[in-house]
Image (cartoon, coloured by chain):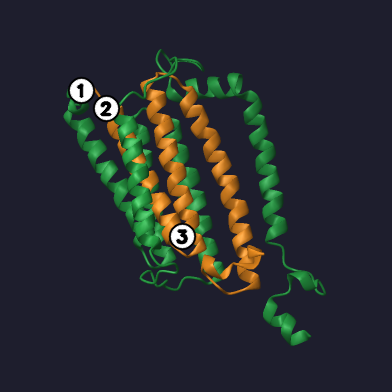
Chain colours: A green, B orange
């Protein structure tokens, strides 16, 4: 516990601000009534997480976080929100199940308490430097690349297959239904045609 | 001396809890999906923290793979959402009970 707050002033300030941004953005995601606002709050959270990555010397991952998450995934979210036209506000007051919100709060508090309890006690297990040390000469990118392209080469190749499968799946799913294909025609049109 | 790992893990735990709570409470499918992203980010933060703490680059490699899988998941998930919304205009998860049996 005495080492808990032994950081230098700059590190502490950066951490506190980034953590505040992350948590405020996350709360904004679940509180905002408009999905577009939720997506923008999600951008805020992702940037905060990227700052926390930089503070822990994961520079490459911070860059990838901003490019892939904030740049691609959130844009995809916004695109779908605009496309399907659900950019209308949701009634966040209404509870579909009685007591659902209270149960979710209790469950969340239990999970948070358990993880914090675990984090406050003994969590530093395992042997260090299994996949290569993060210390020593060379940049973070260099060490990460050496790890990915030697020890994790097969998973890396597998992710390329996964990406191809995802692209094909997305194209098939988002394909316009062909004429006469009754299964893909919206329900209202089916009733009209029959 | 950098900030203690325990504080990073606490932030990650709080972020995960917020994401899980939002997933349970919200009814808009897209917002539920964003809450999944929040939970993924919490776990990524935990990975990076442990990578720093154990002085092992393996944690960061794993975050790299999580990012790739998350991108693929978002692409397929949003494709499914678009095709669902093309059939019916309901925006909430409660309207999607055709699998109820």
Q: Position of residue A26 (x, y in %)?
A: 35, 52
Question: Where is mark 1, residue-wise?
Answer: A3
Residue at horizontal 68 percent and vertical 81 percent from the top: A188
Q: Position of residue B90 (x, y in %)?
A: 55, 73
- Looking at the rendered structure, the secondary structure element under dot 2 is loop
Closer to us: A114 or A91: A114
Question: Where is mark 2, residue-wise?
Answer: B4
Question: Do callouts 1 and 2 mark residues in contact (Cβ within 8 Å)?
Answer: yes
Residue at horizontal 31 percent and vertical 28 percent from the top: B5
- Looking at the rendered structure, the secondary structure element under dot 3 is helix
Identify the chain of the residue marked 2, using the numbered disc in the image: B
- Do discs 1 and 2 share a chain? no
Which of the two discs, 2 and 3, labels the residue nearer the N terminus? 2
> How far, Cα to Cα, is label 1 from label 3?
38 Å
Quick one: label 2, few (<14), some, or many (20+) residues within 10 Å?
some
Quick one: label 3, few (<14), some, or many (20+) residues within 10 Å?
many
Quadrant the C terminus of chain B occupies = bottom right
Quick one: label 1, few (<14), some, or many (20+) residues within 10 Å?
few
Question: Where is mark 3, residue-wise?
Answer: B31
């Amino acid at each position: 516990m005495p080492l808990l707050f032994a950081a230098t002033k700059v590190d502490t300030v950066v951490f506190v601000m980034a953590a505040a941004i992350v948590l405020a953005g996350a709360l904004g995601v679940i509180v905002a009534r408009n999905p577009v606002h939720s997506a923008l709050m999600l951008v805020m959270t992702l940037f905060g997480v990227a700052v926390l990555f930089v503070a822990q010397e994961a520079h490459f991952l911070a860059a990838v976080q901003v490019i892939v998450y904030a740049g691609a995934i959130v844009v995809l979210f916004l695109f779908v929100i605009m496309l399907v036209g659900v950019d209308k506000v949701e009634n966040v007051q209404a509870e579909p199940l009685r007591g659902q919100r209270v149960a979710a709060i209790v469950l969340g508090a239990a999970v948070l308490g358990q993880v914090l309890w675990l984090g406050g006690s003994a969590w530093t297990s395992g042997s260090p430097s299994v996949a290569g040390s993060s210390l020593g000469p060379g940049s973070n990118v260099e060490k990460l690349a050496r790890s990915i392209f030697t020890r994790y080469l097969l998973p890396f190749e597998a992710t390329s297959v996964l990406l191809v499968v995802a692209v094909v799946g997305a194209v098939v799913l988002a394909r316009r239904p062909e004429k006469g294909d009754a299964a893909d025609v919206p329900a209202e049109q089916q009733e009209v045609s029959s | 001396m950098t900030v203690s790992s325990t504080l990073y893990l606490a932030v990650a735990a709080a972020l995960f809890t917020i994401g899980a709570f939002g997933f349970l409470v919200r009814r808009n499918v897209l917002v539920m999906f964003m809450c999944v992203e929040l939970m993924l980010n919490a776990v990524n933060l935990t990975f990076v923290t442990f990578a720093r703490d154990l002085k092992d680059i393996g944690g960061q490699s794993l975050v790299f793979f999580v990012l790739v899988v998350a991108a693929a998941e978002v692409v397929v998930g949003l494709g499914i959402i678009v095709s669902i919304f093309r059939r019916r205009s309901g925006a909430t998860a409660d309207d999607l009970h055709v699998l109820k049996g």
